Image: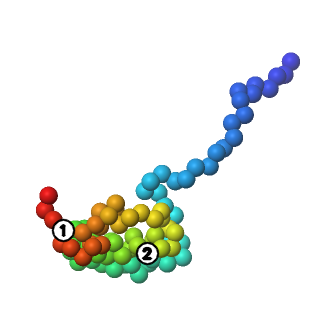
Amino acid sequence: MSTAMNFGSKTFQPRPPDKGSFPLDHFGECKSFKEKFMKCLRDSKFENALCRKESKAYLECRMERQLMAQEPLEKLGFGDLTDGKPKRNQ
């Protein structure tokens, strides 16, 4: 006697990627921004706080080309660079 054991038919439900997951830039659309950011990091001995403008530009490029979700720059930690005001000490 042969019986098929079917424990329930589950179907695959696609879901959006987790926050922080995003497509690779296969076509190099933001390559120049990435290279400027990486050069800044190397020149500043990988002190990323000194390369925030380059980082912001790179993320803006990725958002403009739908390589990552649109997020307000303030939410990404660039609030002090978006309104032209110096960062306040908290």
| Nearest the eye: 39 or 75 | 75
Label 1: how many Cα within 10 Å (few below 14, some 14–19, many 20+): few
Label 2: how many Cα within 10 Å (few below 14, some 14–19, many 20+): some
Above or below for 15 versus 43: above
Q: Quadrant of residue 49?
A: bottom left
- Identify the coloring: rainbow
The residue drawn where x is 44% and y is 54% is 19
- On the question of residue 41 being in view, the answer is no
- On the question of residue 48 being in view, the answer is yes
Q: Quadrant of residue 13?
A: top right
Q: Quadrant of residue 3?
A: top right
Q: Give x and y (percent) for residue 52.
A: 27, 71
In this view, the mark in front (1 or 2): 1
The residue drawn where x is 39% and y is 70% is 59
In the picture, the quarter occupied by the C terminus is bottom left
| Nearest the eye: 63 or 89 | 89
**On the rendered structure, is 57 left or right of 84?**
right
Residue identifier under label 2:
61
- SS at mark 1? loop
The residue drawn where x is 30% and y is 72% is 82
Q: Give x and y (percent) for residue 21.
A: 47, 57
**Residue type, numbered disc 1:** Lys
Above or below for 62 versus 90: below
Q: Give x and y (percent) for residue 23.
A: 51, 64
Seen from this angle, which residue lies furthest top? 1
- CA distance separating discs 1 and 2: 23 Å
Seen from this angle, which residue lies furthest left? 89
Residue identifier under label 1:
87
**Residue type, numbered disc 2:** Cys
The residue drawn where x is 18% and y is 72% is 86
**On the rendered structure, is 12 left or right of 35?**
right
**On the rendered structure, is 72 left or right of 4?**
left
